[in-house]
Image (tube, rainbow, N blue to C red):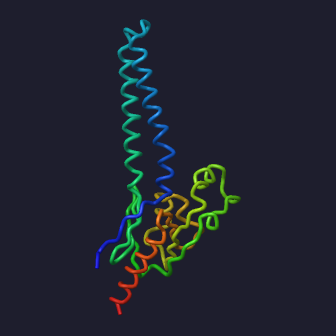
């Protein structure tokens, strides 16, 4: 049997970063066009520092765009032989199958009703409301809840109980892999 399952990108992070990288790309292009445009203008012929600053700011915005675009696939969930790995750009941790009480599925609009969300959160989550998420209900948190809430999106948590809401594209396949690894782990312990 394989030691690791497939990696399933977390759609919340993909959605959030998809909102930012086009804006930073537009900013980079605008700064480059502005720097190029003023280089031919007679009033700015002696302003080399200003032109250099615009080129540098455009390059920095382009670098941020590339980083954001690359981070889209850095957040994932992966079933493994011993545990479930949840990885985000700034936090990676494993949840032992001993901690998993049960795995259920539910639609996002049931977990996070639109009426209870702020306008900002509604705008983020609205395109994903028809999707089904996996909820890992746990016996206890794998890390401090404060640390988890600091590094994870609020859409990972529906309330204060130990659990994780995992929104992936193919939730059935993830659920099947989780249960197969989990059942193998339980049978190996017995």
- Locate residue 129, reporting x and y percent: 60, 60
Q: Quadrant of residue 95?
A: bottom left
At a point 38% along the width and 55% down the height, the residue shown is 74
- Give how far across and how far down residue 134 sits, in percent: 51, 70
Give x and y (percent) for residue 156.
52, 63
Q: Is residue 119 above or below residue 161?
A: above
| Front residue of this view, candidates 60 and 1 | 1
Kindly identify the residue that appears in the image at 47 percent across and 33 percent down: 26
Between 172 and 181, the residue placed more toward the observer is 172
Is 180 or 42 nearer to us in this picture? 180
Q: Nearer the viewer, residue 28 or 152?
A: 28
* Residue 157 located left or right of residue 5: right
Q: Quadrant of residue 98?
A: bottom left
Quadrant of the image for the C terminus? bottom left
The answer to whether 51 is drawn above or below residue 124 in the figure is above
Quadrant of the frame with the N terminus: bottom left
Where does residue 183 sit, x and y in percent of width and height?
A: 40, 85
Residue at the (43%, 31%) spot, across then down? 28
Image mark count? 0
Q: Residue furthest right?
A: 115
Give the residue drawn at x 56%, y 73%.
Answer: 161
Residue lying at the far bottom of the rendered structure: 190
Q: Is residue 36 left or right of residue 136?
A: left
């Amino acid at each position: 049997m394989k030691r690791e399952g497939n990696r399933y990108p977390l759609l919340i992070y993909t959605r959030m970063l998809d909102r930012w990288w086009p804006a930073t790309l537009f900013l980079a292009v605008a700064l480059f066009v502005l720097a190029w445009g003023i280089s031919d203008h007679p009033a700015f012929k002696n302003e080399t520092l200003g032109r250099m600053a615009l080129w540098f700011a455009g390059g920095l915005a382009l670098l941020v765009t590339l980083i954001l675009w690359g981070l889209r696939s850095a957040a994932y969930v992966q079933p493994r032989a011993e545990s479930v790995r949840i990885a985000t750009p700034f936090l990676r941790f494993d949840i032992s199958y001993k901690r998993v009480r049960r795995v259920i599925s539910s639609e996002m609009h049931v977990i996070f009703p639109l009426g209870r969300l702020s306008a900002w959160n509604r705008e983020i989550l609205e395109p994903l409301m028809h999707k089904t998420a996996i909820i890992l209900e746990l016996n206890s948190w794998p890390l401090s809840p404060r640390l988890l809430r600091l590094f994870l999106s609020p859409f990972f948590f529906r309330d204060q109980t130990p659990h994780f809401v995992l929104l992936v594209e193919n939730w059935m396949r993830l659920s099947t892999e989780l249960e197969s690894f989990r059942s193998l782990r339980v049978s190996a312990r017995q």
